[in-house]
Image (spheres, rainbow, N blue to C red):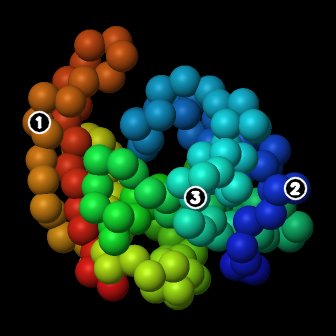
Amino acid sequence: MIIRPATLADAPAMTDLLNRIIAIGGTTAHQHPKPAERVLVDCIDGPHTLTCMVAELDGRVVGFQSVGRNPQLPASTGDIGTFIEPGLQAKGLGAQLFVATLAAARGAGLCDLNATIRADNVPGLAYCARIGFVDCAHDPDWALDDGRVVGRVSRRFVL
């Protein structure tokens, strides 16, 4: 397993991974497929992107973790998102990505990280708890586009 900073060339593989996760549903708040150009701006090289790490296995991207600025959060807080290949979750890949992300987030001068997770995303909530995020806000009424209320939990990690 190689953990490294994402490059522009990773956008297609990251897009494919993200869109497969979106299609499966249940573990991301994203509900509609994203084009590679959007993933590039949101996760790799956009004006709000602070860092993005990819996990590569046998030459293919199997996970990524990005941190960006969210105008609804303090400037010292990064908003983190983690996406892992279905079937490889809960095998330590997210924790490996987080080690590299932590170093980059500290290097970017952040004080803390925010993860906002669907309340029905049990694996995502467990991952964040396992690596040290703590609850800081709840939105029990957050709904998907189809009207299903699933809620959201925001968790914070102090750097």
| Label 1 element class | loop
Task: Tell me the residue at 55%/33% (across/down).
Answer: 22
How packed is label 3: few (under 14 Cα within 10 Å), some, or many (20 or more)?
Answer: some
Amino acid bearing label 3: Thr
| Label 2 element class | helix
Left or right: where 78 falls relative to 117: right
Amino acid bearing label 1: Pro
How packed is label 2: few (under 14 Cα within 10 Å), some, or many (20 or more)?
Answer: few
State how far apart marks 3 and 1 are (Cα).
Answer: 28 Å
In the displayed image of the protein, which residue is found farthest to the top?
Answer: 146
| Label 3 element class | strand
3 and 1 marks in contact (CB < 8 Å): no
Residue pointed to by mark 2: 9
Q: N-terminal of the two: label 2 or label 1? A: 2
Q: Nearer the viewer, mark 3 or mark 1?
A: 3
**Compared with residue 101, is residue 89 higher up or lower down, i.e. above or below?**
above
Q: Nearer the viewer, mark 2 or mark 1?
A: 2
How packed is label 1: few (under 14 Cα within 10 Å), some, or many (20 or more)?
Answer: few
Residue pointed to by mark 3: 49
Q: N-terminal of the two: label 3 or label 1? A: 3
Would residue 24 be visible to someone looking at this image?
yes
State how far apart marks 2 and 1 are (Cα).
Answer: 38 Å
* Residue 150 in the image, given as x and y percentages of width and height: 22, 31
2 and 3 marks in contact (CB < 8 Å): no
Amino acid bearing label 2: Ala
**Compared with residue 95, is residue 45 higher up or lower down, i.e. above or below?**
above
Task: Tell me the residue at 19%/36% (across/down).
Answer: 151
Task: Tell me the residue at 72%/47% (across/down).
Answer: 40
Disc assigned to residue 30: none
